[in-house]
Image (cartoon, coloured by chain):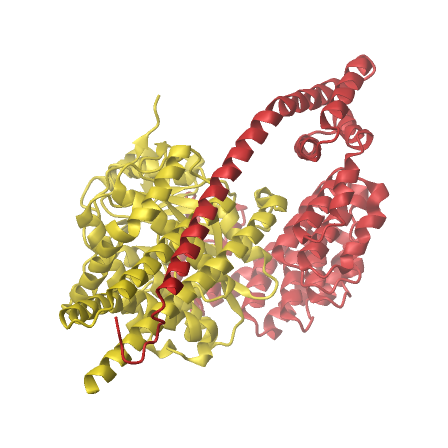
Chain colours: A yellow, B red
Amino acid sequence: MFFEYVISLLNHLFVTYAVGITGIYFILAVISLFEILSYRDTKKYTNYKELLSSPFAPTISLIAPAYNEGLSIVENIRSLLSIQYNAYEVIIVNDGSSDDSIEKMKANFSLEKVPFFVEEKIKTQKIKAIYKSTNKALHRLLVIDKENGGKADALNAGLNVSNKELVTCIDVDCIIEPEALLKLVKPFVSDDKSEVIACGGVIRVANDCVIQDGRLLGVRFPKSSLARFQVLEYLRAFLLGRMAWAKLNGLILISGALGMFDRKIAVAAGGYNTNTVGEDMELIVRMRAYMAERNKNYKVAYIPDPLCWTEVPETHQVLGNQRNRWTRGTIEVLKLHKGLFFNLKYGVMGLLSYPFWFFFEWLAPIIETLGLVYFFILIALGHVFWLKAIALILVAYTLSVLLSISALLAEELSFAKYVKKSDINSMFLAAILEPILYHPKVVYWALKGNYDLLMGKKSWGKMVRTGFKKAQA
Amino acid sequence: MEPSTPILTNDIFFYGYLVLIFAGLSTIIIVGILTNRLLNKLSYKKSFKSQKIIKDCLNTIAALAPDSELFKAEIQEAQSILQRVTQGSPRLAQFVIDRLLDLYKSLTGKSAQALKDVYDNLHLYRVSKHKLMQGNYAIVIQGIQELAEMKRHEDIESIIGFLDHYHRLVRLETRVALVRLIPEDPLMCMKFMKDILTKWEEILIYNKLRSLSPEQIPTFKAYFSHTNSTVVCYSINMAARFLQYDAIDLITRLIFHENTAICWQAVNALKLLQADQAAKYILLLLHKTKSLKVRIECIECLAQIGDTQKLAPLFRKVIDKSKNPMVTKTLSKIFVDWDKSGAKKLSKSSFKGKSRLMISHFSNPLIH
């Protein structure tokens, strides 16, 4: 009798969880699709270039931390210096690189040490020197050479040096679309109801794309199957997830690869946290908490334009490290801000976003694994009604494929970057295979992240990049 | 799984239906995407030739317009080709409008007039006006923008009603359009404006105002007593940007306004207008105001318009005593600027600590 009761209870728990997570993902997908259509309409009549010649356009600091990027640093900086915007500067933070990054920058950009006064609003590792270019054409460039302190510390050094209204934090090895700043800045200047404190854009996969001089010349679907699955994953996360959260004003994650922030609020909130590997999410949560605690009407905006292209891992080891880090980062942020959990004071963030991340981002792989273990126990005990079990697995599988296909629909409705017919076919194939070939690995890496955090692991893990494909001459 | 009290039905057909629904939806989306691509490709192929003809005709008209007397026949021929190509095709008509707008923005004189004639003679304004009757606010905005860009003064009546539209963005675009369409009173739409003026709208209106001739620039002081504080701030700023010196007296009175935003904007405007007659009032405000932002603006304004001989010792005292980094920074910058302009107020040795570092910072030509 007791045994039957336990089984019934567990069944209820697992089914409620599964229905809950599916329902929420579909609600988010529907909201996102409507938002994308609305954004597409807005773009038809918006001339972003009006900002180019205006003296009223907000000033921006583009902060790019660089650690041992000597191979591509010069090309990457050139690309950052050619972004379409008038009132911006590029701050490169050399975070104690052990390679020849700083020498290359000095030689290629005629850098000269300057007596720059830095007010340490946020504590960072020691700044060794600050350089400006003697070439007037490169007046936008400023290079900070500091002792190694990690990405968050480097970004904080950039925040200390910047005196512009907005800051854009980027990964130096990403390819930024020329119009990225014009588009990211728009929500900051056009909202009449609330103060926009941050804005994020879509990150896309650059593997196998054609790149020349830091410019994206041609979009190609990656050849590696691991990268292909990540294309789908990125589309789902960026187009179907974050669009909806932004609409609900509950977005708590802007990718570290590209995000724009109100500098004063980012600094007042304390800048990036150097004790977590989820520093990008942590900053947004803290900025939001800062505003909510002061009863300010604020917003975190998000735009679906593909503004930043990044190289994703193509080997299991590197991808595993990355996902492990993401999981640890999520848990650390949730732990640091546990006071938000169902806390009315923090509005949508406390009531929806935080619980969503807790139940459906952190716990999802754990519950999924427990469900699987439970299923095997039931098999061993002969408690499985096979026909129903197979039917349920099929329902879950087709649902998962439908969600991925919906992400492709979102892409088609918005930007349709993959134009070749073979690319579309490959994307469909990836959507069909992903739940079987890729998803189990992601669950495993997430579980390992949980385990590693318990064991006290703090490191970032090594990221090996293969480099972008060069344009054919 | 067979629990004693099943939470899910044991009816296998129910799950079968679910699988069919999900698989069916996926298939519909895939087929939809492929069909959409195919249709786009076919439509592109079909209209490719026509689009090329349209581009050529418009380029011909724009290029030959300055010598329209000589090339009257060629221009008329190009216009009739355009009429023939676009007849019965809303898609191509829209293509002509888009292309016309692109060209019109970068051309002036006879070429621009010739393009406007194409818009009028081909009755393309009807396409734009039709958009005003649509339910989708984005389409309405496109219609308003097209009519305004092509300077359809005769359609002002159709546009002006949108000042009361339910959608904020339609109201905004209408105001911007009217700046272009009513050059004799470009800001008339602001007279009863209740919306908050966003920075985006400020940018759009300023860009439109800049394209007007000097005699068409409105007298901004007429808006200084507006009930909407964002309009007041903007008009003060515009008065300064367009160097309307006759507004100085009114602006000087506004520096004591109870609204800090207006107060700051007024001080900033006096700085831009180099209104030295207002120096004593700024000094008064500097002692009176509690807002740090206003205080810093007052210091910057005084540095521009005040008597450097009198101010230098005063500022030098503050710079070493002030604990506020923003004040120190502002004053350091002022001293360096004074030095550069030949006032020679700077003696690095007399500055201490933070202020000394800031002086070196601002003295460096690569930084400042």
Q: Give left or right: position of A204 versus B330.
A: left
Residue drawn at x 72%, y 53% as measured from the top left: B239
Image position, residue B249 (x, y; %)? 76, 61
Q: Residue furthest bottom?
A: A1
Residue B43 or A199: which is nearer the viewer? B43
Q: How many marks?
A: 0
Task: Using the rendered image of the protein, determine whether residue B288 is visible from the camera's viewpoint.
Answer: yes
Residue B180 or B130: which is nearer the viewer? B130
Residue drawn at x 22%, y 48% as measured from the top left: A463
Image position, residue A199 (x, y; %)? 47, 57
Q: Quadrant of residue B208?
A: top right
Image position, residue A113 (x, y; %)? 31, 44
Q: Quadrant of residue A14?
A: bottom left
Task: Using the rendered image of the protein, determine whether residue A267 is visible from the camera's viewpoint.
Answer: no
Q: Residue furthest top?
A: B70
Image position, residue A306 (x, y; %)? 44, 45
Whether residue B107 is situated above or below residue B274 in the rendered picture: above
Whether residue A35 is situated above or below residue B322 in the rendered picture: above
